[in-house]
Image: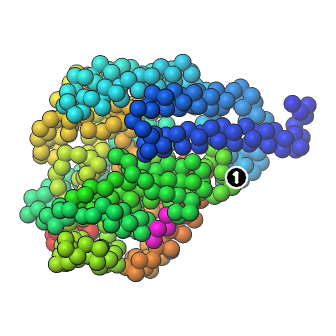
Amino acid sequence: MCPIDGDDCVNENFEELRTRLSEIGDIGSSIALLYWDQSTYMPEGSAMARGRQLGTLSKMAHKMFIDPEIGELLENNRVLEDNNPYDSFEASFIRVTKRDYDKATKIPPEFTAKLSMHNTEMNQAWVKARPADDFSMVQPYLEKTVVYSREMADFFPGYEHIADPLIDLADYGMKASNIRKLFAELREELVPVVKKITELEPVDDSFLCQPYDKDKQLEFSKAIAKDIGYDFATGREDMSPHPFTISLSIHDVRITTRIDPNDPRDCIFSTIHEAGHGMYEQGIDPEFERTSLAGGASSGVHESQSRLWENIVGRSLGFWKFYYPKLQEEFPEQLGNVPLDAYYKAVNKVQKSLIRTDADEVTYNLHVMLRFDLELDMLEGKLAIADLANEWRRRFEADMGVSVPDDKDGVLQDIHWYHGMIGGQFQGYTLGNIMGAQFYETALKAHPEIPGQIELGKFDTLHSWLKNQIYQHGRKFTANEIVENVTGKPLTIEPYMKYLKEKYGDIYGITL
Ligand code: ZN
């Protein structure tokens, strides 16, 4: 340790801090690789061994990170935060690492171990309960989850709402109160739109529901991912039951997709969605490699990128003006006689459906808000787990006007609650939709030529703009800061509702 707080000393301390965090980062990347393998190619019988390996590495990384010496090094380098501009690498590095450190040290390692064991057991119960359509198989586990989630929240005293610390873990800086307000506004606007559209004659998408060659689907989707800017030199695409993106390094960001042999939509749009996540991670400043800044700002900002590319770009008419003739060439039997307009309507079909992940852009947020509200009710103690399945049905029917035939496609459908906390799990999806539209509106103001370029299969201007405004900064800024810096105003539902109303008003030939 240095006797005085001279510049050399700060440098020495800074280098030591960087080295130690880099090594922790390398363990994190190794964890990611094991997880990627587990979710793609690992033999089924290896689950237990892999669980142990992941457990050991996670414990190691956590222990190394919460070492009091890291706290001291951070304290010794505080001057870098004070003496450098807020958005400089040094100040951001110290600020963000300190925030992570403060959080990590508040959660006792015994709690993390207990929770991870519980999550494994609960997940195993869920894997059986869902196909069996038997909520009672997970009920006792879920009751424990609520207790653990509250315990987790209480490690961060001083909150306004018990869900706040849990929301904060995924969407730093967001609170139940702000999200509730935003979601209430959105619901008020969305419900009449959903009602108007779903009262109309349903769109015909039968031509998409027939056999489509799997290899051709994959090749076509990969070509799109490459065109929009996902870099296969530092990435790859594989298959998994639930598509995901994982970063092993800024120079190794992998995506997965899935293929429905009887519907090309799943593969194409899952690929574009994950490529959006992937481009975000690939676009982070390479200088941030092996630091706490190498990652997305929040779950909401991440989702804003995947959904901007998937929906605003990938489901636009201009996009398909370019790609549809190519898709027809690949699948002449299925699509040769189907006009562009019919295809465009089919990939944007609005319908009241049971499953969130299959939901269209218009109804999607109702699925998310339902889950968000139930999470708050459970944490507040207003809703007992014993009543959750029934409350789900009641709420779903009230929101969607569709009755839920079973729990399998109701309360048991998403993995989130059966794999982690109750609280903070879902808001990011809708925040992402709202943010994505606000970012895109700003991009169009700066570059009105973007829609014309999309029609020609050119995405450079939009990709560079997003990289410049959002991707390169990694975790330097919070979600709220990014929204304000990029768009000049706080998060608002206006651009999103304007986008939905214009797009779906045109598609359905009505005023929304
Ligand atoms: Zn996503």
Looking at the rendered structure, the secondary structure element under dot 1 is helix
Pick the quarter of the image with the N terminus. Answer: top right
Amino acid type at image mark 1: Phe
Residue shown at the point (66%, 46%) measured from the top left: 290
Colour setup of the view: rainbow
Q: In the rendered view, would you say 362 is above or below 28?
A: below
Location of residue 371 with respect to 382 vertically, above or below: below
- Judging by the rendered image, the residue that carries numbered circle 1 is 89
Instruction: From the top left corner, tell me how far across and down residue 444 is, in percent.
Output: 44, 72
Residue depicted at x 20% and y 30%: 132
Residue 469 point in image, percent of width and height: 55, 63
Please check the rendered image and state whether residue 184 is part of the magenta-colored stretch, yes or no. Answer: no
Hey, which quadrant is residue 130 in on the image?
top left
- 176 left or right of 78? left
Asked whether the viewer can see residue 423, the reply is no
Residue at image point 49% right, 32% down? 50
Tell me which segment is drawn in magenta.
226-230
Q: Compare residues 309 and 469 and report the one nearer the observer.
A: 309
State the predominant SS element of the stretch in magenta.
Answer: helix
